[in-house]
Image: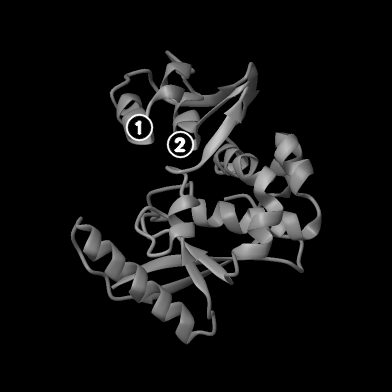
Amino acid sequence: MATRPVFLPNFEGQSLVQERVFNFPWASGFAEVQKKKNVTALHAAAMREGIPRILEISSKSEEKVGKHLSAFSLKIEIGTRKYPLESVYQGSKVFENGGPFTEVFDLTPRDAKRFMREQSCGNIIRFQLEGKHYPLSPKNAFYDWLYIRSLAEHADWISENVEYDAFTDIEFNPAKQINCQARAFAEFLSLHDKGKLQEAAADFEAFAEMLKII
C-alpha cells in the first residue's frame, strides 16, 4: 500500500489548495505501465470518496492536457526567449560555492537535472533569476511561482477547457519531495478564480504571502 495526496483548488476559503490523502495498492517498479497502474489506483481511491474528475499532471498522464501541463513540457518566458520551466528552475539555484547556472536554461529538463546532480557546490542557499534573489521559504514558493508565471497568459483558455475537480502527480512523494506540479496547478486555478492570478504571477512576494507554509 502507498499513501499519496490529491490536490483540489479552494475557491471559497483563504487557502489556495485543499489537500486530501488516500491509501491505495502500490504497483512497484519503474516501468511506465506500473506508474500508470498507480495513477489509476490513486484516482479510484479518490473517486470512492466523492472526487469525480481527476487529472494526472505528469508525463505519465493518460490525458494529453495532463502531459502538456507537466513542468517538463511547459515553457516560461525569460527576457525575450522561452525556456523549459524545469530547466529554469534548476539553473536558478544558488549554492554555497556556485550558481546560478543560467547555461542550464538551454538544456532539456532531464539534462538540466543531471547537470545539477553532478555539481558539488554545497547546500542550496537561495534562487536567483533575472538579477533578483528569491528565498528558500516558503519551500515550494519559487517553483510554484515559475509554474504559475508560465501559465498566466493561457488562463482564460485553461479555465474554459480544463474541466477537472482535482489533480495528482504520481511521481510526487511528500515524504521525500517539496515541489509538486499538481499542487501548483490547483493553486493556479484558485488564484484565477479569486481574481489574484495576475498579481501573483507578477509579484513573487505577493504570491508567497498567499501560500500555506509547508
Q: For residue 25, which quarter of the picture?
A: bottom left
Protein image colouring: one colour
Q: Classify mark 1: residues with Cα within 10 Å, few (<14), some (14-19) or many (20+).
A: some
User: Residue 77: x and y, percent?
Assistant: 60, 30
- Furthest residue in direction right, as rendered: 195
The one of 205 and 165 positioned closer to us in this rendering:
165
Q: Which mark is residue 149?
A: none
Is residue 57 visible from the viewing direction of this image? no
User: Residue 150: x and y, percent?
Assistant: 60, 40
Local SS, label 2: helix
- In the figure, 172 relative to 101: above or below? below
Residue 10 falls left or right of residue 101: right
Q: Which mark is residue 86?
A: 2
Residue 120 falls left or right of residue 161: left
Q: Amino acid at mark 1?
A: Lys
Local SS, label 1: helix
Instruction: Tell me which numbered mark, 2 or 1, is placed earlier along the sequence.
Output: 2
Look at 38% across and 26% down and name the residue there. Answer: 107
- Furthest residue in direction top, as rendered: 97
* Marks 2 & 1, CB-CB < 8 Å contact: yes
Which quadrant, please, contains the N terminus? Answer: bottom left
Q: Amino acid at mark 2?
A: Glu
Q: For residue 79, which quarter of the picture?
A: top right
Q: Which residue is mark 1?
A: 113
Disc 2 and disc 1: Cα gap in Å? 8 Å
Is residue 38 visible from the viewing direction of this image? yes
Look at 69% across and 42% down and name the residue there. Answer: 208
